[in-house]
Amino acid sequence: MQYWINHNGVQSGPVDLEGLKEMGLTSAAYVWHEGMPDWVKITQLPELQGLYEMLDEPAPGPQAVVTGTPIEEVQQGQAMQQPCDEMSLSDEPCPSTNLVWAIAATVLCCAPLGIAAIYQATRVTKCYRAGDLRGARDASEASQWWSISAIVLGVVWRPLILSLMCG
Amino acid sequence: MRRTLIWIVIIATLLVFGVIYYALDPSGSSLFPRCSFLELTGYKCPGCGSQRAIHALLHGDVVTAFRFNAMLLISIPWIALCLYAESQRTRNPRLYVRLNAPLLIWAYLVMVLLWWVLRNVFGW
């Protein structure tokens, strides 16, 4: 992934993660990479955590500092994807909501745990739409675990206890 | 490769369960797991009756299935839609997000919760 940086009004890039590490950035820097609709503060990209120095005070006058996007530069190299009217947040597809499992677990196995799985499924697309890919992945995983525990509790656990008591 | 293997396991499991639930009637058999929630609290959970409903469905008796667990019958087309969405997840991410919209999933969740309460009130 190539990043463009705007640090204290000075624009640079493209650089990769290695190059970014050596730039001595602070949390006041702004970043952009292909597929993003606009510049964001470096602190908003979880994958860049730890690659910059945290400043105590929030940078004054946030958006005004950054003007112009490096779209022209990109177009020279490769075709820039046209921003979609909605959900152009990320190149990555949405993590699975695991809703099939959640519904099956609710109706067939252990409903209370299945309902927790369905709730986590709502959070997957909610986070994804908000651009929070990490949150979406976490919710996807949580939904999966609720479904698995529902299936274990509803299908595997009961017959096991029964056979132990009867046998 | 790993995905194909997972699908084979899932389909084989479904077939085995299908044969078991076709051949044996859960109503009169102690082989089938009873609902833990029902035994603990005395109240029905949203999934209670689904084993008998599946048995009835496999014998083509939709009306009896509906009486045992209406939510199961409502869920089947929903699950089919979700499976379709899942198959399109990487190919058509926008469709996936639309079919898995938080509002839609919330609607299903509310339906399940209502079903849970109402079936205990009215004895469905």
Image: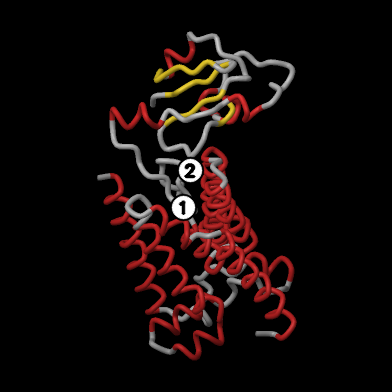
Residue B111 image point, x, y percent:
62, 73
Q: How is the image coloured?
A: secondary structure
Residue A157 image point, x, y percent:
55, 56
Does residue A4 appear in this view?
Answer: yes
Front residue of B112/B11: it is B112
Element under label 1?
A: loop
Quarter of the image where one finds residue B88? bottom left
Q: Which residue is mark 1?
A: A85
Count of numbered circles on the image: 2
- Judging from the image, mark 1 belongs to the subunit labelled A
Disc 1 marks a residue whose amino acid type is Asp
3D distance between C-alphas at marks 2 and 1: 10 Å
The residue at 41%/41% (across/down) is A92
Q: Which residue is mark 2?
A: A89
Does residue A166 appear in this view?
Answer: no
Residue A165 image point, x, y percent:
59, 60
Task: Please name which of the two marks, 2 or 1, marks the residue nearer to the observer.
Answer: 1
Disc 2 marks a residue whose amino acid type is Leu
Front residue of B78/B95: it is B95
- Judging from the image, mark 2 belongs to the subunit labelled A
